[in-house]
Amino acid sequence: MAGYSGTPLPKKLGIKPGIVVALVNAPDAFERILDPLPDGVLIKEGLRGKTDLVILFASRMADIYEQFPRTERSLNDGGKLWIAWPKQASGVKTDVTQPAVREFGLAAGWVDFKVCAIDTTWSGLAFARRNAKANRAAR
């Protein structure tokens, strides 16, 4: 069972019935730890077509910089983005940290709203597009 709580991983990641989820650079057999999925969920590898939720796995910040423009374009309005990176204790060599991911997302106009232990190797930070209309009203 992934994570540290009794909450199923699909629920923690916001995977809801009928949505399209794109996995980018996912570890082998990642789909297995998502089982069981809510009804009607379509999981696809890569960023072809539009999607409701993207889970982008990266062990280097360079991977995030490289993949982000295509990732952003692939998301439907209201789509969510998870950026996942190896935990420090995982033993995987990485330059990705939670503060670096948050800083990147905020600079790109997104806002983080949830952190998640995906499994024993990966942590993730969820982002949504910043609401431009709400930002203008707050000024």
Image (cartoon, rainbow, N blue to C red):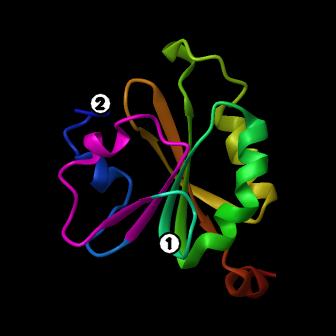
- Left or right: 50 as drawn, with respect to 1: right
- Residue 60 placement: quadrant: top right
Instruction: Identify which amino acid the numbered label 2 is placed on.
Output: Tyr
Q: Which residue is mark 1?
A: 51
Query: Helix, strand, or loop for circle 2?
Result: loop
Q: Position of residue 122 (x, y in %)?
A: 47, 31
The residue shown at (68%, 72%) is: 73
Q: Position of residue 11 (x, y in %)?
A: 28, 55
Name the front one of labels 2 and 1.
1
Neighbor class of circle 2 (other Cα within 10 Å; few <14, some 14-19, many 20+) is few
- In primary-sequence order, the first of circles 2 and 1 is 2
- Closer to us: 6 or 74: 74
Q: Position of residue 120 (x, y in %)?
A: 38, 24
Q: Position of residue 126 (x, y in %)?
A: 53, 54
C-alpha separation, residue under disc 2 versus residue under disc 1: 28 Å
- Left or right: 98 as drawn, with respect to 84: right
- Left or right: 120 as drawn, with respect to 132: left
Instruction: Identify which amino acid the numbered label 1 is placed on.
Output: Thr
Whether 34 is drawn above or below 70: the answer is above
The residue shown at (54%, 12%) is: 91
Q: Which residue is mark 2?
A: 4
- Left or right: 119 as drawn, with respect to 71: left
The residue shown at (77%, 49%) is: 66
Part of the protein shown in magenta:
20-44
The residue shown at (72%, 56%) is: 68
- Residue 3 placement: quadrant: top left
Asked if the magenta segment contains residue 90, the reply would be no
- Closer to us: 94 or 97: 94
Quarter of the N terminus within the rendering: top left
Whether 10 is drawn above or below 29: the answer is below
